[in-house]
Structures are given as C-alpha cells and as structure tokens.
Amino acid sequence: MSTPALRGVPAPLRADEVARAYAPFEQARMLPPAAYTSPEVLDWEQANIFSGWMCVATADKLPRVGSQLSVQTGAGGVLLVRDEDEQIRAYANYCRHRAHELIPCGGTAQRRSIVCPYHAWSFKLDGGLRNAPGFRDVAGFDKSEFGLVPIAVTDWHGWIFVDPSGDAGDFDDHVRDLESVVAPYRPEELRTVATHSYEIAANWKVIIENYQECYHCPSIHPELCRVSPPDSGENVDTDGEWIGGWMDLDDRAQTMSLDGRSGGVPIPGLDETRMRTVMYAVCFPNILISLHPDYVMTHTLRPLTPESTFVECSWAFPVAAAERAGFDGAYAVDFWDLTNRQDWTACESVQRGLASPFAIAGPLAPDEDGVYQFIRRMGRAYAGLGPDPEQRPSITTDTAEVPVADGHV
Ligand code: FES
Ligand SMILES: [Fe+2]
C-alpha cells in the first residue's frame, strides 16, 4: 500500500539509468534492473501509479442494486457498490468507527446495507451512516459526520476504474483517443463467458513489455504465427494514457484460434478493417485490451510483490454467441490460454535474469517501439517529469481510419 511521503518525489533509482529509458529511441536502454526487483520501487509505484486511475473490476461483477465487491489498489482497499440508482460507487474500504475492513479484499456481498462485521455499524449504499448500535442516546453524536469516504469511480465500457488519489484528472483525458478505438466493439454489450486467473513470478512491467511486442512471436508462439503474421501491423500514435497497435489476421484465418476459425459470431457493426485485424491496447497502468472481430479479451494486472503479479484474463463474446446452448468460447480461450502460458514462461525467465547481480539494462530492437513507448513513460514518471513534449499527435478519431497491430501478449 502507498505511503503519502512517496507521492510526487522521484523514484528510488539511479537518475542516469532512468534517463537512458527516456532518451531518443535509438539510444534508449531498458529500465534499470532494479526497477523490476526493488521493493522500494514497487512502493513508489503503488503511491504514484496505482493510486491514480486504474482498472479494478468489470461491471458485471456488480450485477444488481446492493452488489458489493472489495478490491485492492496502491492506496489501500476500495469497496465498490451498486447503489439504489444502479450506479457504481466506490468508498475507502474501512469503517468510520474503528477502521475494520467492511469486506475483506476480494470479497463480495449482496444486500442493501453495507455492514461492518466488527461492531455492526451499517451504512446506506450512498455511503451515509444508517445505524451505529448503542449511539442513539449519545449526546452530540452526529451521524452525518461518519459517512464512508467516497472515491472517484467510473464505468468505462463495462470496466470499472477508480482514482483513489482524487487528483489524477479527468477520466476522459486518461483514455482520450482510446475511446474511438474501443467504442466500435461495444464491450459493455458483450458477455463474459470465461475468466482465468494467473499468478506470474514476474514484475508487472515485464508483462506489459511482453504484450507490447511481437519480436518474440516467431520464437515462442508457433500457433499464433499460423493465424497472424508476426511482422504485420504497426503501433499507433496515441494521445491519452494508453499505447497500442494492431496486427493482421492471416488470409485464411477468421480470428485468433488454434485453427483460425471462429466458433462464435462477429461483433455487430464492425467494419471490414476491424474484421481482418486484432487491436492490442495497454490502458495505463493495468488493463490490456485485445479487440478481435468476434470477441474481446482483457488482462487486468495487479502487482503482488516486485517479482510477482496477479493477472485475471477474461473473454467476452456477443450475446448471440454467448447464449447458444453449451457455448464456452473454448476456441478463443484455449488459444489464448496456450499463448498466455508461453508468455508467462518467458516473462518468468526474464524476471530471473533481471534478478541476477550481473543484470544490465539492454537495448531495444527496431520492432520494440511499443516497449519503448512504455519505458519512456515509466522513465519520465520515475524522474518526476511532467507531460511528454515528444508525445506524438493524436491518431485520427475517424474510426474507419484507425490503423489496425503489433503487440500482444
Ligand atoms: S469498526 Fe466497524 S463497527 Fe466498529
Ligand atoms: Fe507473446
């Protein structure tokens, strides 16, 4: 959990090594190995990165009025609640009496009150204190002073983001032109059919870097290369807190699956370009969105330790496919589970290498420009620098013109 003293100060890394990561592309080096292994660096990241806008859940985990779910952020636990108006609200996950957690991290509840398990204080779904047992006759006790602490929250296409810091700015600026890339797929109308959880023995940044390049695909992903040429596509110029790129499908492939066939239906309304490509986007800091012609896959990351990360991978399909009797999305799930595991094996090996006392930051290949976009942002953040003057102009918002991919997991 974050320490306020760490907010707004440079990260505990050597400044000259960090500067190499945001040098011009051709001269850049990866982040220093300590960025992937140091507990102090993770503390800094929790305070400065995982305390601003981050994805914590999908909206379908709060299906009804009174649904409650607690999640972890760099600023401590957050309680998500669907209120009486069916809107999602977020509160700091502690009781205003003596700070017991309202729901243990990862836990859920379904009731029209939020009830603390310690002394049974209860709160309304709008956060107001409903009842404090034994306080009825206590002079001067004012219920209105003891409501839950609200946290900024938004439901973006079915993904719930919170900003515990309260100062991460407007969410629309966070996603800026990613909105025009994601909106045509209408993820909020898709149905999550499968979810896999992985605990990976690698720093969270190793996983994002791996997602951002397909330089490794010919070496470790033979199945992927059969349905999507690894040298196809390109990364896009982005505006907002995201990076991404597209890849072509092979001429004989309908989608990303082991035999290239789709076992579902196309997402309604996609244009010809989107039907022949897959778009891969990293929405900072922790959700990877993979947009296919017939399904949307997301990886949500949560750092556990400097050297381990929890990843939840979900597959969502159009309702017309999801409601078919016996539909399990296995054609997509099996393909990506295999590919995920190939990637996790590589990421864990990278982590062991970075932990070597002999590790030195390496160079970036021309095909690793997506990795560069990520480490440049991280390097500038570590150094406490402001907005990037080199940030390239926004991609077009004409969705038909959005280029189609180079990165993936
Ligand atoms: S700490 Fe919650 S009721 Fe006492
Ligand atoms: Fe990969």
Image: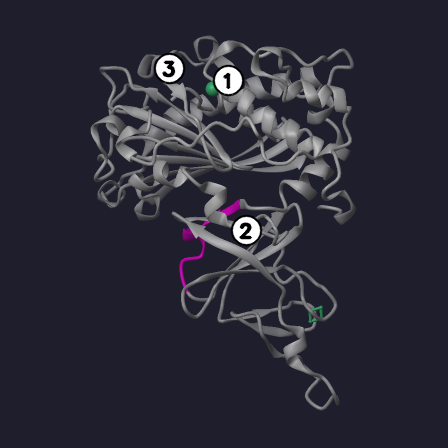
Residue placed most toward the observer, 59 or 379: 379
Q: Is residue 364 above or below residue 257?
A: above
Q: Specify whether 185 is left or right of 150.
A: left
Circle on res. 223: 3
Identify the residue at image location x=32%, y=23%. Answer: 257
Question: Is mark 3 in CB contact (under 8 Å) with mark 1?
Answer: no
Q: Is residue 203 visible?
A: no
Which of pointers 3 and 1 indicates the residue nearer the eye?
Answer: 1
Identify the residue at image location x=27%, y=31%. Answer: 293
Query: Three-letter amino acid code at disc 3?
Result: Glu
Q: Judge: label 3 CB < 8 Å from ligand 2.
A: no
**Is disc 2 surrounded by few (<14), some (14 to 19) or many (20+) residues within 10 Å?**
many
Question: Is mark 1 in CB contact (under 8 Å) with mark 2?
Answer: no
SS type, badge 2: strand
SS type, badge 1: helix
Reading the image, the residue beneath label 2 is: 162
- Tell whether position 59 is magenta: yes
Q: Judge: label 1 CB < 8 Å from ligand 2.
A: no
- Tell whether position 206 is magenta: no
Q: Specify whether 40 is left or right of 301.
A: right
Q: Earlier along the polypeptide chain: callout 3 or callout 1?
A: 3
Query: Three-letter amino acid code at disc 2?
Result: Val
Query: Three-letter amino acid code at disc 1?
Result: Asp
Q: What colouring style does the render use?
A: one colour
Give the magenta range: 55-64
Residue 123 in picture, x, y percent from top left: 58, 73
